[in-house]
Each structure stands twice: as C-alpha cells, then as structure tokens.
C-alpha cells in the first residue's frame, strides 16, 4: 500500500498522514501538487518513509500505472462505495484530497475505485488525517500479516 494526498493549499494534514503511514509501514507517501508541506506533524517520521512529489494528478496517475497500482480515492463523493464493506486491492495507492474541498475533479477522474467512510454525526466530513488513518487501517486489516506484530 502507498498513500497520496493532494497539496494545492499547503494542507497541514500531510504531516499527520506521513506519521500514520510510517506506523503502518506503507511503501511510500506521495504529495500531489505543491512540493512544500508542513513537516511538523510528521514528528520526524518523514526520515523513515519514502516521500515522493508529483507535480500534478496526471504525473501521479502515470507513476501509479507504471507501478501497477490501483488508485483508490477516499472521499464522500456521489457514487462512492462504503469503505467498511468494499474489498481494497492489495496493490493500491489510497488517494486523499485536501481538508475542506476534498479530492479535485482531476483526482476523482483517475480513481479506479472511490470509497467513503461511514459517518453518523452532524458533520459532513472528518479530518483528512483521521480519514487517512481509518483507510490505511482498513487496508491493514484486509491484507497485512499480523503474525509478526509485537504489542
């Protein structure tokens, strides 16, 4: 599993996503858009996980295609299917939009699958960093070898 996040407005969630990605030992974190991001939330974990920049969605999609990875968008867009009951591809990159606007139209267009996280409260969406953690954990529950985990 790899994870990617769009970065058009200097999203502060990227550091948190990098930290969570390190906890789940992802193959890499991909920043789509602006190269600069706030590393404070990463708590130095960006030194231990591969972070790659893609200047735009098309470059990111080309990379994913070359790597044989399915792009799975995580957003509560029309047509999205429930993350909780949808199998995730083993060879995948989970793509997240920015806090607030979510995935851009360009990003949604390149997704082979769009999943949404079930929410029951009054808010329309949850924090992008929290959504990324939930989606990464869903992939881990489905695909990881948990026999080597030490608690």
Image: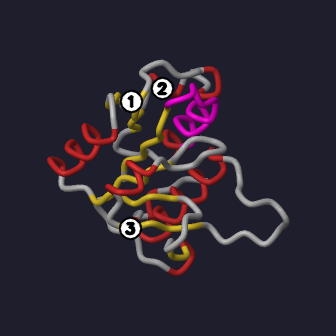
N-term-proximal mark, 1 vs 3: 1
Where residue 145 sits: x, y (%)? 40, 64
Quarter of the image with the C terminus is: bottom right
- Proximity of marks 1 and 3: CB atoms separated by less than 8 Å: no
Residue at x 63%, y 46% (from the top left corner): 128
Q: Which residue is mark 3?
A: 113
Instruction: Report the magenta residues as a range.
Output: 8-20
Q: Left or right of 84: which side holds 50?
A: left
Under circle 1, the secondary element is: strand
N-term-proximal mark, 1 vs 2: 2
Q: Is residue 73 above or below residue 115?
A: above
Where residue 67 sits: x, y (%)? 18, 49
C-alpha distance separating marks 2 and 3? 27 Å
Where residue 129 sits: x, y (%)? 63, 44
Q: Which of 41 and 121 lies nearest the eye of the viewer?
A: 121
Under circle 2, the secondary element is: helix
Q: Which residue is mark 1?
A: 51
Q: Which residue is mark 2?
A: 46
Residue 97 in the magenta stretch? The answer is no
Q: Residues within 10 Å of mark 1 (few under 14, many from 20)?
A: some
């Amino acid at each position: 599993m790899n994870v990617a996040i769009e970065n058009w407005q200097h999203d502060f969630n990227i550091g948190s996503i990098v930290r969570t990605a390190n906890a789940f030992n992802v193959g890499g974190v991909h920043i789509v858009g602006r190269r600069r991001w706030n590393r404070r939330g990463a708590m130095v974990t960006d030194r231990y996980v591969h972070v790659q920049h893609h200047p735009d969605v098309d470059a990111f999609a080309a990379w994913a295609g070359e790597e044989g990875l399915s792009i799975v968008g995580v957003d509560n867009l029309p047509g999205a299917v429930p993350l909780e009951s949808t199998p995730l591809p083993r060879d995948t990159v989970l793509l997240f939009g920015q806090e607030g606007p979510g995935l851009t139209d360009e990003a949604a267009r390149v997704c082979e699958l769009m999943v949404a996280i079930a929410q029951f409260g009054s808010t329309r969406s949850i924090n992008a960093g929290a959504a990324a953690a939930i989606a990464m954990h869903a992939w881990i529950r489905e695909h990881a070898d948990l026999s080597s985990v030490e608690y």
